[in-house]
Image (cartoon, helix red, strand yellow):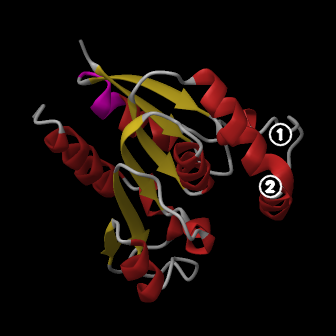
């Protein structure tokens, strides 16, 4: 039986998910993959919100609502692959009991405000040019595996080259390849 893997979107949810299909296509042969829009988990209105409006929505109760809904939806053990705000949602859900084996969070810059880490295997990925990535002190103090990808920005996860490397790392961690 395949291991379960969930993918949590960035702040754009299912608005532009062409990049998400890279991950789903590469991982679905080896995992039972479920995609979640972070916006839908947070019960964001369907109207077209700006990036600033989306950030404000998540910071003003949206993250907490998404965490609650994700925990209600997912009961079994799983691996989590989460992008940007999705990484923060996943982290907080894991702290509240989401049954995860591994958490891969990419460009989850809001984690820099977290002081507690979930118990389990965690790998963080940030672009070297992402000005909101956690600082070196936070990364060392929180004691998780992390990778700073030189010359990359916040949205590096939308690049095919990065997606391929990350998917191979995920597969290798399960010795599927």
Given residues 90 and 26, the one toward you in this image is 90
Up-down relation of residue 1 to residue 60 (above or below): above
Up-down relation of residue 73 to residue 117 (above or below): above
Quadrant of the image occupied by residue 55: bottom right
Instruction: Name the residue at 70% across, 31% down.
Output: 69
Up-down relation of residue 4 to residue 54 (above or below): above
- Does the rendering let one see residue 15? no
Instruction: Name the residue at 62% across, 67% down.
Output: 110
Q: Which element carries disc 2, helix, strand or loop?
A: helix
What distance separates the C-alpha of mark 1 from that of mark 2?
A: 8 Å
Q: How many marks?
A: 2
In which quadrant of the rendered image does the C terminus lie? top left
In percent of width and height, residue 60 lies at 86, 57
- The answer to if 13 sits in the magenta stretch is no
Using residue 101 as the reference point, say whether residue 38 is left or right of it: right
What residue span does the magenta drawing correspond to? 25-29
Instruction: Name the residue at 86% across, 44% down.
Output: 48
Q: Are marks 1 and 2 in contact (CB under 8 Å)?
A: yes
Q: Earlier in the sequence, mark 1 or mark 2?
A: 1
User: Pointer 1: what residue?
Assistant: 44
Up-down relation of residue 111 to residue 72 (above or below): below
In percent of width and height, residue 155 lies at 51, 62
What numbered label is drawn on residue 54? 2
In percent of width and height, residue 132 lies at 58, 78
Using residue 112 as the reference point, say whether residue 117 is left or right of it: left
- Does the rendering let one see residue 59? yes
């Amino acid at each position: 039986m395949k291991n379960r893997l969930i993918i949590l979107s960035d702040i754009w949810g299912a608005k532009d998910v062409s990049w998400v299909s890279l991950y789903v296509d590469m991982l679905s042969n080896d995992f039972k993959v479920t995609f979640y829009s972070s916006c839908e988990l947070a019960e964001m209105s369907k109207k077209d919100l700006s990036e600033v409006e989306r950030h404000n929505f998540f910071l003003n109760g949206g993250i907490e609502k998404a965490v609650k809904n994700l925990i209600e939806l997912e009961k079994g053990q799983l691996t989590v692959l989460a992008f940007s705000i999705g990484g923060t949602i996943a982290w907080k859900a894991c702290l509240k009991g989401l049954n995860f084996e591994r958490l891969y969070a990419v460009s989850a810059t809001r984690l820099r405000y977290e002081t507690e880490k979930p118990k389990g295997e965690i790998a963080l990925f940030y672009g070297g040019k992402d000005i909101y990535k956690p600082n070196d002190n936070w990364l060392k103090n929180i004691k998780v595996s992390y990778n700073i990808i030189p010359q990359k920005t916040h949205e590096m996860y939308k690049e095919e080259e990065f997606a391929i490397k990350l998917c191979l790392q995920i597969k290798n961690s399960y010795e599927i390849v």
